[in-house]
Every structure is written in C-alpha cells, then in structure tokens.
Image (cartoon, helix red, strand yellow):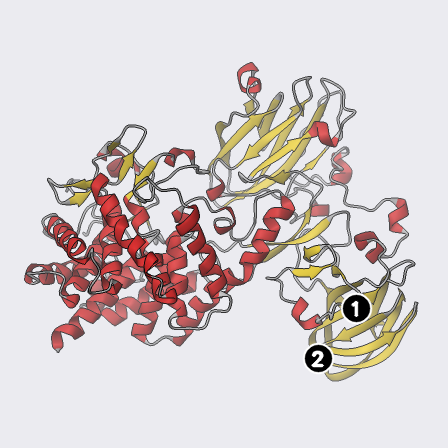
Amino acid sequence: MGFYFENHDSMYAQTGQDIDRTLACIVHRFVGQNPPHPFTYRAYCKRGILRDREYRYRVDFNSIFPTAQNEQLVYAWSKYWSEKPGELKFDVTCFGPITIYCNGATVFESDIFTERYSDTRHTIFIPVQAGWNHLVVRCKKTRAGFGGAFGTWLGKLSYYFLMPTPERDGQEGWIFTAPMAEPLAQLPGPGTGEHKAGQFCFPANHWDARQAKQGQLQRLYGMTPGAQAVGWTKALLSRPGRATYTLAGRHQGPVSVWIGGREVFRAAKSGTISARVQLPFGDQDVQVLSTCAGKDWGFELALRDGRTPVRLVNPANVTGTDQPWIFLGAFAADAAVQLDALKDLHQVHAAIVGDTYWRIDAPDTWVRPYNENPCYGRWNYPLGVTLYGLLHAAKAIGSAEVQQYIVDHIQSCCDTLKYALWDKAQYGGATSVHTLLSSIDSLDDCGSFGSVLLEVAQHHDIAGMREVADYVADYIANRQVRLSDGTFFRKNLMHVFHEETMWADDLYMSVPFLCRYYQLTGETKYIDDAARQFLGFKARLYLPEHRVMSHVYDFTRQMATGVPWGRGNGWVIFSLSELLAVLPINHALLPELLRFFRELCAGYLALQDADGMWHQVLTHPDSYPETSCTSMFTYAFARGIQYGWLDQPEPYLRAVFRAWEALNRSSIDRGGNVHGVCRGSEFSFTPEYYKQKLLWNLNDTHGIGIVLLAGVEVRRLREFLRK
C-alpha cells in the first residue's frame, strides 16, 4: 500500500507516464466538483445587528434602546449551518453581562473579568451539530454597557448567521427582542415563528401605518420631483408560442412598462395601467420606469392570462423575502436610464445620492449578494495558484471549456470589486463578496490572485482587469509594510498571530505579481522590487547548513524559527523561477539570484527521498511526504534545466522524472483526487507542529494547481529534450 491509498488506486496504475491523462483527470474533477453557480442574493436589513470591519456582529443596545433600564435583558437569536458535527470557533467581547446558548445549552457566560475589559476578545469553542444550529445571545444592561461583539475569530475566515424564523428565512443577521425585565421562560428554537416567539420583532420588517399608505417608491426614495426609479420582476409565461396577455394596475406619476426589453405601455401622468400585449413563452423580464411628479410615487402592476394571474418571481431569486419586485433608484431627472444595463447584479449604479444598489420594499432592506461557492468566483491566494495551474493544464490538453471556466471565475472577481467596496462602506465593513480584497491588509490578500489575473489576461480578454491590477499594485508598492531595506514583512494585521513576522510564503504572494505587472507596464521599478525581495528574505531566512529556507522570521524575538517547512521552501524556489524567467539579462542582480537558485536547488536535491518525494519538514524524513512542495521543486528543477540556470542538469533531470512518477504513484489517485497537501499554516519554532498538528487535506487548493503546473512543466521538459 502507498502512503495515502492502495497502489492499484493510484493515477500511475491507470495512466502510467501519460501526463495529459493525469492533467485532464485532475482538471475535470476540480471543475466538476466546483460548478460555476451564481451568487446567492439575500434580503438584508441595515437596521439590524451588522458585522463590523473585523467581520464580527457588533451591537450597542444602548443606542437602539436609549430608554432601557439597568438590569433589563435583550435576546438576540439566529441560526448557523454546519455541514458536519464539530466546533465553531467564536469570539466574544462583552460590553456588559452576556450569556450565549447554542441549541438550548449554555456555551458561554460572562463574569466580572470578561465584562471588565470591553475591548478584549474571548475565544470559545461552540459544539455544533450537522445542519442548523440555533444561537441565542442574552445581553443585560448595566451602567457600564449593554451589548457586545461576537462571531468569527478572524475576518479572513468570515462566517455569518441567518435569521431563524420562517417569516425572514434566508436573511442574514439576528432578530432580537425589546428590553424586558424578566428572562424568557423558554428559549426559541427550530420551528418557532415570530408570532410564537412573541417579543422577537426587531429589526422591523413592516412599514408603519403612515408609510404603508404611500406608494412604494415614496417609501423607498422620498419625494424629489423629476427623480426616476425602476422596479423589476420576472413573469413566468406558460402558454406555447406567442400569446396575448393583459396588463392591469395603477401608477402615480409618469411611467413606462417594458417586458422582454420592449416597451408595452407608457403614460405621462398618474392613472391606471391597462394594455393587451403579445408575449412569447418563457421567463420574461418586466421592468417599470417611474418618475416622481411631486405627489405620491409608485405603482401596482399585474399580468394576466385571461382571468388567471401570471406568476411573478423575484428576478434575483432573493431569499429572505416573498416579494417578487426589487427596486433601484433614485436617478436624477436628466439621467439616461438604461434598463438592460441595470440588470447586471454585479454592479452598483450612479444615483442622486451616490452609488446605489437594488432594494426590497421593506424598511431599510436591501438586496445583498453572497458568494457561497467555496472554490468559484472567489479571490484568495490558494485559488490564485489553482487557477494558474488549471489555465496551463487546460491549454495543454486543449480544453477551451475549462479555459472559459477560468475566465468566467476571474471576470466575476473583476466585476464585483467596485460593488464590494461600496458594500463595505454601506454596511459597516464586512462584505459578503471579495472579503479579502475589500479588507486588504497583507500580501496574502492580493498578490497570488493578482498574479493569475495578469497571467490569464495574457491569453484571454478580462474586462476591468487593469483597474483591479492597478489596485493590487498600489497596495504592494505603496501600502504594504516594509523593513528599512524595503523587504516585505507582516504588521498591522487583522490576524494578530502573524504580527511582526516575515514568511517565506510572501515571496509567492508578491514576486509573481510584480513580474507580471512589470511586463504589463514596462516599469522596471516593479521587477527591481521583486529581485531585491529575495536578498532581504535570504538575509533573514536562509539556513546555510542545509541550503534551504526557514519558514518564518519572528521580529519580536529577532530570530528565524529554523524550521524548513516544505511548502514554504516551495514558494521560494517557485517564485524565484518566475522571476528568473522574466528578469532582463543585463539586470545587476541576475548573477546573485542565479547563484541563490543553484544553492537552493542543490539543498533540495539532497533532501529528495528514495521514492522521489519531499517531506513536510524537509530535514525530517519521518514527517509525511508532502505533495505541494514536491510539485514546486519538480516545477523549479524542470524550468532550471530548460532555461539553463543549472550548471549540471543531469541529477536534476533524474529528480524531476522520479518526482513526477512519485506524485502519480503516491499523491494522485485514479479519480484525479490530490492527496497529501498540507493545509494552510500558522508557524512554530518546533518541527513537531508541522509534523503532528499541521496535517494534510484531500484536494486542498494549496496544492491542486501546483501539481498541475508541475505536470505541465514536466510535459514541456519532455518536448525540450526531444529537440
């Protein structure tokens, strides 16, 4: 039996030396398991308990209930979905006394120490069951404070909660009670509706009596004469071919009605809507463009098939509401409203009061997109290298379909950055798309995916690519913290464990992007910056006795950890090969960087095991054979041979083919699953952390793309050797 699975289940047992079959199997498994589902759109009430810039829910009940009395209680209730039983790492900050319940059991109760420091985070581990878990947070008012902050322990690993009652099922957030003098006799739980839960009536989701009498556009946008707004729904037309339908309704102010992109009704002043229209079978967009005439403002509209109402559905499939209409406005009187363009749900739109987005006809309730795909349409560093590998593997096997999948993923990221920055300003800091790039504070957040953006843009058109690339470049060049010699390090981070450190990983999180941005702009300062980074990192992380790199340098102790983590070293040599491939031949640092490349390759070559693999801790052969570092050393060696960077290529040539065979025998199974990839790491001064705590995951995105890139480079090496 192999280390991870039976030998007969290996890719090698199925394909032997056929690289293209290995690449195709891995590629199609990944794409098949991560289909390009659209975003989920949820109703979101801005009057509720919002997530802050640290991605935790933060509520000061004193500001919501200024007349609350000391010792009164407020209960907040929500639910959280878990795929399997386990623990939810959860941070709590107490402004006053807080008790937290999960599925009816007490999981946290503050004391005088946790209540004493209202800016201190306390981490708890909440047992969760598979499926829905109901959480209740009870806050008591004292003279010191009333409320707290609770939720994720790290914004980079954000999660959110959904409203738990059938009336708001699908909305993000918490419902909560008014202040009460006595504790609830029974905690709410599954199946409890708002009418049964009694006091759980905040945030309000119904208009008051005065507002309910107004037209919906006055409720939403006020009264600005000449202002314009749009309502949008979808009609489900079930009659075959083309059939006649009837429009009926009323409106206040000028209005035009469009169905399927064609105007079917127009009126210059308030009145009724009545028209017969010929419409084809299928789902048809229904849009109403209204203008405020200075009185009430809004419309009612129905579509009928004879006497039967045509079903209208929400065009964004918004969860958390049963309303079929969404609304956008208010636009200036002289704005040329392009109805078709407004249907792009990735965009914010210019309005009278600045950019805006779609809304629901409920108090301060908006449509909000959520990317709930773990590996599609997301921007993060493991997916950056995954897509890099997918791109070149897809090109190698001739798959236009997979290349389009990659383009669509990246296009989605480009399309939604402006929205994400608007969302961050609108709702308190925590976004539901682009969580990393919108709260950027490290190279992890931008460099890897920024690099694949530029790589893909060399082969395919990506709209908005340059704006996003410039955004990333500005962070790396102008905002990323550096030492006095210009070397990157980590400081002022959301993830405080990384504070005052330098990671070998960050060479990949910066250098490949700088290389490609140099190619895009022609500005040598970016390639110079990339080259100098290796000198700064080598000065602090190089372990000359083994000719490898330490994982991390800790500036609080003024020393390197001394542990040569496999993937950390892989990032270094991988990134150095990226740099050497584009560094001008007359660059002043080229000789020194070539020497460094050869030193590292010699160190890694000496540590390859008898089977052809490298290990989680390079100098500890008892640690597990690790797939991602093996792939990156394979990639770098293969490139070194082809580019002539290695003085004596023969031993490296043997190492490349041994390693690729080992990956196919030991790491890639017959289904294209990739085993033995170390999960995302923290750091330690002891190798035991890496060997015993930092274990591997199946199909981890830290390794899939790197395996593909290794295969592509071995394929190129074979072609090179045939010449």
Quarter assignment of residue 638: bottom left
Quarter assignment of residue 419: bottom right
The mark nearer the N terminus, 1 or 2, is 2
Q: Is residue 129 left or right of residue 387?
A: right
- Residue 161 in view: yes
Secondary element type, mark 2 = strand
What's the distance in space between the residues labelled 1 and 2, CA to CA?
24 Å
What amino acid is found at the position of numbered circle 1 in the picture? Leu
Q: Is residue 583 above or below residue 597?
A: below
Q: Residue at x 37, y 63 (%)?
A: 29
Q: Is residue 376 left or right of residue 220?
A: left
Q: Residue at x 71, y 27 (%)?
A: 62
What amino acid is found at the position of numbered circle 2 in the picture? Phe
Figure label count: 2
Q: Give coordinates of residue 521: x percent, y percent.
A: 39, 65
Q: Give coordinates of residue 34: x percent, y percent.
A: 44, 60
Q: Is residue 125 above or below residue 15?
A: above
Q: Residue at x 46, y 63 (%)?
A: 410
**Where does label 1 land, which residue?**
289
Q: Give coordinates of residue 124: x percent, y percent.
A: 49, 28
Q: Is residue 401 above or below residue 534?
A: below
Question: Considering depth in this image, is 601 or 484 the residue closer to the camera?
Answer: 484
Secondary element type, mark 1 = strand
**Where does label 2 land, which residue?**
281
Mark 1–mark 2 CB contact (< 8 Å) = no
